[in-house]
């Protein structure tokens, strides 16, 4: 009897994809507002961007008081803010894309709602969640960075292509690109079934040479995560035909429209809230980051082979209302002990999460692309509580046996 084949799929997008341009703009604006605030810990941002054709529209709310702006009247302040943000966006977003196009900027921000502000900043210094929400974090032991192999390959392919564009060894390529990887689950590991890659290109290009180089990059990227790779897999490059028009010229881009690309490439759940443009009081962002931190530490502690951590929040409340852990039947110890170890060692209060994350200066715009959990230097990628969790759980098991 033939068993049904099991396939795992993941996708990624490049830095020139219109949705990621919108995400980047929102993060650049958030970075700027937080950096200019006298008290960075009290700065608040919730920025949304729409980019389409020649138009860039930035909207949102913020709270970031600055001594330097107190002497300006409101009209002068908003005028100064507009030009500063416009220059920041051009320098941080479009220059790296080598995009010299002229855009119509429409930037209008308002001050954070008093209702939201009073829910977040309590008189007793306890910080409440900036919104209600459900967030997920995921980790697996199938790769060194605790991310799914399919997502790793999809992401690595685009990073390889981008590097070749920058060093001019892949000519006539543009930064708008998208990859998709389909792996077939085998008895011991995975085998590559299909890789789909779309890369923007100039009108006059050598199609055969272009696709040959991309095929080589695909195989090189896949081999990093599957050393014993099979090379008999399907490769589809620009399967719809030509891909000349890209970026916002071809498709509108909106902040938060690539949620699965920001996390685990469809392998795990996503709560639905976007990350980009938001400060750490927004648990859509910080809650998802701490959920990833918890999942990764559980896997690092070898208490599970994979874990998906779900946290639920209510606006104004300092801690999650519930914690759920799905181990996909890979847990070595009872799940209730895993949850107890999380409550004991993981920072769960919004205030504690922010303090942990702010121990090193985080630039949101530096982590916009290629997944928010792909930079191993960020604080939520640390595995500093894994040993504590393991010792605690083993001690609790020992007590139960007595």
Image: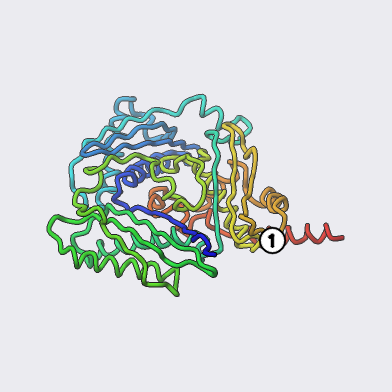
Query: Residue 296: which quarter of the image?
Result: bottom right
Is residue 63 left or right of 237 when viewed as pictured? Answer: right
Q: Nearer the viewer, residue 109 or 369?
A: 369
> Could you tell me which quadrant the C terminus lies in?
bottom right
In the foreground, 342 or 142: 142
Q: Is residue 254 left or right of residue 46?
A: left
**Point 40% across, 64% down: residue:** 193
Residue sitting at the far left: 204
Indicate the quadrant where residue 248 lies.
Answer: top left
Q: Image height check: is 334 above or below 274?
A: below
For residue 7, side relative to residue 108 (left or right): right
Q: Nearer the viewer, residue 355 or 152?
A: 152
Q: Image quadrant for the N terminus?
A: bottom right
Packing grade of label 1 (10 A; few <14, some 14-19, many >=20) is few
Left or right: residue 137 compared with residue 57: right
Q: Quadrant of residue 215?
A: bottom left
In the displayed image of the protein, which residue is found farthest to the bottom? Answer: 228
Image location of residue 114, percent across then percent down: 49, 24
Residue position for label 1: 332
Q: Report x, y in % for residue 223.
A: 40, 71
Identify the residue shown where x is 45% and y is 29%: 112
Relative to 195, residue 80 above or below? above
The percent position of residue 182, horizontal first and vertical second, equals 41, 59
């Amino acid at each position: 009897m033939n068993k049904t084949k099991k396939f795992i799929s993941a996708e990624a997008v490049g830095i020139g994809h219109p949705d990621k341009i919108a995400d980047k703009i929102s993060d650049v604006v958030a970075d700027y507002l937080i950096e200019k605030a006298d008290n960075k810990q009290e700065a608040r941002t919730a920025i949304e961007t729409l980019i389409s054709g020649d138009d860039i529209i930035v909207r949102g709310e913020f709270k970031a008081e600055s001594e330097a702006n107190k002497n300006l009247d409101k009209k002068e302040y908003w005028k100064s803010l507009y030009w500063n943000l416009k220059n920041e966006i051009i320098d941080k977003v479009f220059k790296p894309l080598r995009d010299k196009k002229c855009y119509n900027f429409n930037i209008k921000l308002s001050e954070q709602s008093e209702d939201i502000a009073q829910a977040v900043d309590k008189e007793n210094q306890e910080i409440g969640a900036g919104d209600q929400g459900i967030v997920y974090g995921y980790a697996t032991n199938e790769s060194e960075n605790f991310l799914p192999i399919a997502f790793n390959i999809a992401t690595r392919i685009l990073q390889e292509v981008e590097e070749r564009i920058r060093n001019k060894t892949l000519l006539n390529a543009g930064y708008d690109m998208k990859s998709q990887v389909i792996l077939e689950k085998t008895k011991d590991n995975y085998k590559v079934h299909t890789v789909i890659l779309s890369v923007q290109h100039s009108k006059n290009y050598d199609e055969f040479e272009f696709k040959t180089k991309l095929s080589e990059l695909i195989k090189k990227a896949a081999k990093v995560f599957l050393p014993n790779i099979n090379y008999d897999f399907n490769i589809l490059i620009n399967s719809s035909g030509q891909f000349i028009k890209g970026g916002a010229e071809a498709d509108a881009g909106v902040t938060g429209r690539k949620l699965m690309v920001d996390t685990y490439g469809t392998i795990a759940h996503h709560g639905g809230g976007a990350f980009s443009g938001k400060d750490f009081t927004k648990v859509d962002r910080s809650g998802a980051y701490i959920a990833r931190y918890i999942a990764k530490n559980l896997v690092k502690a070898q208490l599970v082979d994979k874990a998906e951590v779900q946290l639920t929040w209510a606006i104004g409340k300092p801690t999650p209302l519930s914690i759920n852990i799905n181990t996909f039947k890979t847990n070595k110890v009872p799940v209730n002990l895993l949850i107890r170890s999380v409550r004991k060692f993981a920072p769960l209060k919004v205030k504690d999460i922010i303090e942990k994350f702010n121990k090193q200066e985080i630039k949101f715009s530096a982590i916009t692309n290629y997944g928010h959990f792909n930079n191993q230097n960020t604080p939520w990628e640390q595995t500093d509580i894994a040993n504590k969790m393991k010792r605690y759980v083993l001690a609790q098991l020992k007590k139960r046996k007595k």
